Amino acid sequence: MENGLFPPDGVNVISWISTPDLWGTVVVEADSFDQVMRAIGVWRAAVPGMFTTTKTAPAMAVQEIIPLAGKINHSVNG
């Protein structure tokens, strides 16, 4: 972080929290998956072994997902 590698260009950190058991969650906004991978990759390279598991999932606001899910359902099920 001190040398400007995190967050990488194009990545906006919205929330970065940790639990007492040191499970961390970072919510970022990015235009591409590549940018998200760079954000995770910087930490993996800087602190090898820090992450035993990572989970990455795209997300969007619920009010945007509901109409999209409806369109997908309609296209599949008619």
Image (tube, grey):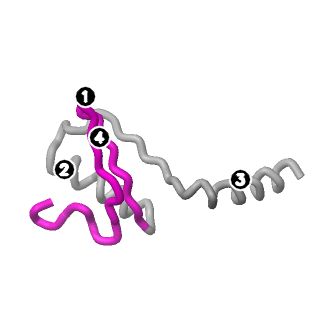
Residue 4: quadrant of the picture = bottom left
Reading the image, the residue beneath label 2 is 45
Name the one closer to the observer, 29 or 5.
Answer: 29
3D distance between C-alphas at marks 1 and 4 = 9 Å
The magenta-colored residue range is: 1-30
Reading the image, the residue beneath label 3 is 69
Given contact means CB atoms under 8 Å apart, are the residues at marks 3 and 4 in contact? no
Q: Nearer the viewer, mark 2 or mark 1?
A: 1
- Which circle marks residue 47 in the picture? none
Q: Residue at x 19, y 36 (%)?
A: 49
Q: Nearer the viewer, mark 2 or mark 3?
A: 3
Residue 15 belongs to magenta span? yes
Lower position in the chain sequence, tag 3 or tag 4 = 4
The image shows residue 30 at horizontal and vertical percentages of: 41, 65
Single out the residue that lies furthest toward the bottom: 9
How many residues crowd mark 1 within 10 Å: few (<14), some (14–19), many (20+)? Answer: few
Residue 12 belongs to magenta span? yes
Reading the image, the residue beneath label 1 is 21
Q: Amino acid at mark 3?
A: Ala
Q: Nearer the viewer, mark 4 or mark 2?
A: 4
Lower position in the chain sequence, tag 2 or tag 3 = 2
Q: Amino acid at mark 2?
A: Ala
3D distance between C-alphas at marks 2 and 1 = 23 Å
Q: Amino acid at mark 4?
A: Gly
Residue 65: quadrant of the picture = bottom right
Single out the residue that lies furthest toward the left: 2
- Which circle marks residue 24 in the picture? 4
Q: Amino acid at mark 1?
A: Asp
3D distance between C-alphas at marks 4 and 2 = 17 Å
Asked which secondary structure carries label 2, the reply is helix
3D distance between C-alphas at marks 2 and 3 = 37 Å
